[in-house]
């Protein structure tokens, strides 16, 4: 391959944008190509291009900078744009929560300022990636192709899958971020949401702020809501953790009690153990991970992925009014009515089915991670060709410590690196800004090794 140092990034949401920014900061002289099939999601992705009335960040402003070496970068941008976001910005408080819309604007404008004239953006769907001449060949659009030295797969969160027995029919929507969906819901319509996580929270509050009067019911297996945020404080957790799930659970409880005794609380404990999460997860045997997913993952999620206090207050007010309720159980059947649906479900720890009706059903179960089920054409192609492998627990791709996908024969595809959500099987925590930012910064450091290796190969060839 000609020594051109070409790098393709597939996906131009937050993960892909961070990858491009860090590759530029690495100053390796590479030509960077950024592919995105949805023009409206350039630099914003799914997370920051939604159209709901209420979609706040779930992390305070002071912890949302694109650059770890400049923690107030986002805050300064907000201050410079106060006129646009005057109703959101609290000048004195880095612990405030602003809208995802504002953050999406920040990411897009930061990219345009630092990278737009140094990155070639191609609005087209990548249909295949193949090993080629020591690098990769990218097939995109209508029969077009591009040869590059390295490829970065930065898909972000992928479209969720409807849980059985629901199917995608009018009135049942698999993708909760479908444009204009909220506008089709009348104020008196009854709404049923599957899932009780952060997506559900944003939907319920958005409906309420539009003056919704109909009944809103959310159901999940455990019926637990994300906990509200509280003030964050720095705290030093233990440095050694046990390797078995029962001992880990006891250790976490001990740490929570110690944090409470120190006056910082369990929330600060959860925030300060993030750097230890991946090593703990990687030491657990497969069966222990399976047990965690079955019995403890929900508890982890509601304490780790929290909502702003304002969101919690909205939900409590709706509960008091009798508009909003949460159920724990499993859907057993769904039948279309003349207008709406009849849903049969079994409450948790019970055998007798219960029935409720709703005009709309909204899927809030979270993005699909099982690569054998994902319908994205590129992922389906790579999986069918054996170029990527499925984690046994369906949590994402099989990758090595550097983020290279493992082929079906177990060997790493070293010309390709992954960022973000599909590394969850290896890292567990890999969907929030902090983890994706760390991966992008490591990518920038790794890029120097790529260029050095390519240079040495070209010299030896001569």
Image (cartoon, grey):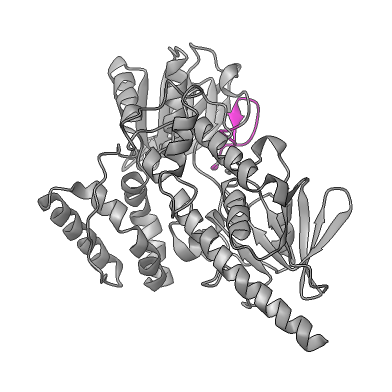
Asked if the stretch drawn in magenta spans residue 40, the answer is no
Residue at 62% x, 47% y is 114
Residue 37 vs residue 345, the one in the foreground: 37
Residue at 31% x, 22% y is 319
Q: Position of residue 36 (x, y in %)?
A: 71, 46
Number of numbered markers: 0
Quarter of the image containing the C terminus?
A: bottom right
Specify the quadrant of the image occupied by residue 131: bottom right
Q: Position of residue 180 (x, y in %)?
A: 62, 23
Which residues fall within the magenta stretch?
A: 163-177
Q: Position of residue 362 (x, y in %)?
A: 53, 30
Quarter of the image containing the N terminus?
A: bottom right
Residue 400 vs residue 290, the one in the foreground: 400
Where is 448 relative to 261, above or below? Answer: below
Residue 145 vs residue 190, the one in the foreground: 145
Q: Is residue 102 left or right of residue 263?
A: right
């Amino acid at each position: 391959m000609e020594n051109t140092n070409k790098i393709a990034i597939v996906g131009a949401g937050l993960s892909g944008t961070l990858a491009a920014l860090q590759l530029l900061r690495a100053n390796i002289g590479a030509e960077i190509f950024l592919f995105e099939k949805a023009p409206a999601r350039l630099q914003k992705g799914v997370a920051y291009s939604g159209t709901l009335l209420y979609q706040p960040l779930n992390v305070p402003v002071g912890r949302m900078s694109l650059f770890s070496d400049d923690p107030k970068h986002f805050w300064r941008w907000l201050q410079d744009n106060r006129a646009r976001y005057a109703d959101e910005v609290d000048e004195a408080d880095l612990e405030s929560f602003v809208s995802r819309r504002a953050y999406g604007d920040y990411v897009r404008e930061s990219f345009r300022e630092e990278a737009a004239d140094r990155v070639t953006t191609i609005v087209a769907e990548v249909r295949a990636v193949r090993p080629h001449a020591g690098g990769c060949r990218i097939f995109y659009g209508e029969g077009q192709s591009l040869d590059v030295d390295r490829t970065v797969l930065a898909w972000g969160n992928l479209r969720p899958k409807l849980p059985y027995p629901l199917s995608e029919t009018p009135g049942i929507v698999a993708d909760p971020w479908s444009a204009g969906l909220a506008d089709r819901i009348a104020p008196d319509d009854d709404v049923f949401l599957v899932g009780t996580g952060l997506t559900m929270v944003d939907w319920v509050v958005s409906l309420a702020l539009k003056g919704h009067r109909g009944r809103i019911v959310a159901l999940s297996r455990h019926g637990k809501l994300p906990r509200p945020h509280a003030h964050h404080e720095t705290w030093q957790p233990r440095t050694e953790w046990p390797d078995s799930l029962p001992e880990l659970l006891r250790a976490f409880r001990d740490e929570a009690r110690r944090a409470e005794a120190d006056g910082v609380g369990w929330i600060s404990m959860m925030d300060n153990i993030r750097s230890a999460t991946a090593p703990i997860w990687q030491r657990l045997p497969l069966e222990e991970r399976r047990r965690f997913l079955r019995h403890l993952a929900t508890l982890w999620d509601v304490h780790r992925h929290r909502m702003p206090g304002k969101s919690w207050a909205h939900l409590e007010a709706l509960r008091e009014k009798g508009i909003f309720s949460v159920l724990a159980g499993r859907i057993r059947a769904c039948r279309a009515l003349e207008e709406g649906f009849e849903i049969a479900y079994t409450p948790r720890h019970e055998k007798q089915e219960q029935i409720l009706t709703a005009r709309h059903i909204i899927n809030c179960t979270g993005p699909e991670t099982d690569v054998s089920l994902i319908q994205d054409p590129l992922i389906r192609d790579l999986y069918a060709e054996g170029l990527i492998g499925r984690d046994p627990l369906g949590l994402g791709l099989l990758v090595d410590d550097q983020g290279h996908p493992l082929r079906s024969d177990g060997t790493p595809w070293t010309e390709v690196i992954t960022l973000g959500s599909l590394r969850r099987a290896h890292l567990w925590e890999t969907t929030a800004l902090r983890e994706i930012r760390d991966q992008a910064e490591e990518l920038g450091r790794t890029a120097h090794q790529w260029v050095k290796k390519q240079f040495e190969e070209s010299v030896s060839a001569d």
